[in-house]
Image (cartoon, rainbow, N blue to C red):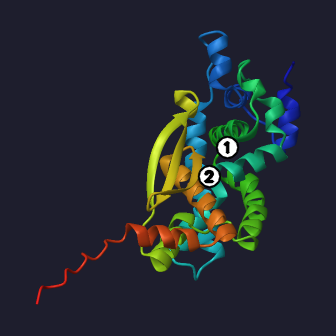
Amino acid sequence: MTIDLHEFEQLLGMQFQDMQVLRQALTHRSFANENSETVMHNERLEFLGDSVLDFLAAELVYQRFPAFPEGELTRLRSALVRTESLARLATEIRLGDFLFTGKGEKKFTGRPRQNLLCRGFEAVIGAIFVDAGLETVRDFILPRFGVLLHDIVEQALYFDARSVLQEKAQAEIHITPNYRVIGSVGPEHEKDYIVQVVIGETLMGEGKGRSKRAASQAAAEVALQKIAAEGWGSLAMIAAQLSPKPEPTVAEDN
């Protein structure tokens, strides 16, 4: 399949001065590995774009919510730049149709597909920054971030699931949740961590994420959904079983 970079420029609403930087942004490592050694993949641009997006997301929430404390701003920023959010923005510009990928990545679906789109979007942002500067990136991303931010606030998608779970668990059964990394999936450069959250000795949820922290948040969200459906009753019984039992009293002989 031939990829038309000029069509993608039209979808972005801009013209690149250096088409090579755009091509690099759209080139996944898998494609570079299967082709010439001189083909440059997009991971350096992905790194740059990730930092630029973090900055612009922080700037937006700082200006939009002047009364919010640091913790709330951090959660809003994280919600704006998380994998699902950036994959959504990537889908809106049909990024998946223009990525140069190896044969294995072409069949990605579900979470791996989201990771691919998210990282490709970060690389495109890095390319725009290199080619045209920060103001051009700002003009491109802020309207899109604005729509995302509205949905995030409207649906309360920015809450810290780990904090909520800890507060609930300590208040209801006086036990602090524990998180454990049980493995990872995917190639080294696109690894997803798998984390489980355990309350007492009960497995409450499992999540995946690009970082251990993101995977922990995903596991906590699963746990909260389970608790919302089942309640705390069974956990309260477990907590009672884990509590130290009083030593039986022995009647004294008269």
Residue nearest the observer in this picture, 58 or 134: 58
The mark that comes first in sequence, 1 or 2, is 2
Residue at (48, 41) in percent of width and height: 182
Farthest residue, direction top = 36
Q: Which residue is mark 2?
A: 53
Q: Are marks 1 and 2 in contact (CB under 8 Å)?
A: yes
In this view of the protein, can residue 175 be seen by the observer? no
Snapshot quadrant of residue 205 = bottom right
Up-down: is 247 above or below 107? below
Relative image position of residue 136 (x, y in whole percent): 71, 50
Relative image position of residue 145 (x, y in whole percent): 73, 60
Relative image position of residue 65 (x, y in whole percent): 63, 77
Query: Is 16 left, or right, of 193 in this rendering?
Result: right
Farthest residue, direction left = 254
Q: Which residue is mark 1?
A: 125
Q: Quadrant of the N terminus?
A: top right
Up-down: is 252 above or below 102? below
Provide the secondary structure element on which disc 2 rests. helix
Residue type at the position of mark 1: Ile
